[in-house]
Amino acid sequence: MFEKSLLALLTAAGVFLAGFASTAHAAQNRVYELRTYTAVEGKLDDLLTRFRDHTVKLFEKHRMKNIGYWVPQDDPLKKNTLIYVISHESREQAKKNWDAFRADPVWQKARDASEANGKIVEKVESIFMDPADFSQLK
C-alpha cells in the first residue's frame, strides 16, 4: 500500500514538473511586440475607436495577448500616435497570428468601415522584444 501511494505521489510530481517545464519553455519563447501607429492628421480618434470597438477583441481571437495601450502626453505625438504592446507565444506564432488576423473577414469589415472617409493610419512601426531577466514580464 505504501509503495502504491509513493508511486502515485511520484507520478503526480512528474506530471506537475512536466507541466511546469512545458510552461517555462512556453514562457521562454513568448515574444512581446511594441507597435507604434501614426494616424493621419485629425484621425487619431477614429483609430482609437477602431481599436476600442474591434481590434482589441480580434487580437485576442487570434492568440495575441493585449498588454497595454498608450497615447503620448506631449505634443506633437499626442495628436497622432497610438503605442501598444501585445505578446505572442513565439516569433513564429506571431506571423501566424498576424496572417490570421489580416485574413479575418470581421477585421476586414471593421477596417473598411473605419476608412470609409479615407485612410486613418499613416505609418506602423513594429519591434519584437524579449523581457530582460529582471523584468516582471516573462
Image (cartoon, grey):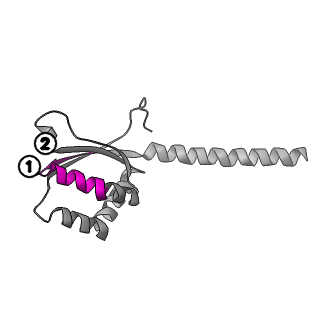
What SS does tag 1 mark? Answer: loop
The reply to whether residue 91 is in sight is yes
Q: Which residues are magenta?
A: 35-55
What is the x, y in percent for residue 103? 29, 68
User: Which of 10 and 67 lies nearest the eye of the viewer?
Assistant: 67
The residue lying at 9 percent from left, 50 percent from top is: 42
Residue at the left extreme of this rendering? 41
What SS does tag 2 mark? Answer: helix
Which disc, if any, is residue 66? none
In the drawing, does residue 18 fall left or right of residue 135?
A: right
Q: Earlier in the sequence, mark 2 or mark 1?
A: 1
- The residue singled out by tag 1 in the image is 41
Instruction: Kindly report the distance in space between the C-alpha atoms of the residues bearing marks 2 and 1.
Output: 8 Å
The residue lying at 42 percent from left, 31 percent from top is: 133
- The residue singled out by tag 2 in the image is 79
What is the x, y in percent for residue 118? 10, 62
In the drawing, does residue 67 fall left or right of residue 40?
A: right
Residue at the right extreme of this rendering? 1
What is the x, y in percent for residue 135? 41, 32
* Residue 104 vertical position relative to residue 81 in the rendered view, above or below: below
The answer to whether the residues at label 2 and label 1 have Cβ atoms under 8 Å apart is yes
Q: Residues within 10 Å of mark 1 (few under 14, many from 20)?
A: few
The reply to whether residue 104 is in sight is no
Residue at the bottom extreme of this rendering? 105
What is the x, y in percent for residue 20? 59, 44
User: Which of 27 and 123 lies nearest the eye of the viewer?
Assistant: 123
Q: Indicate the amino acid at tag 2.
A: Lys
Q: Examine the structure image and report whether residue 107 is included in the region drawn in magenta.
A: no
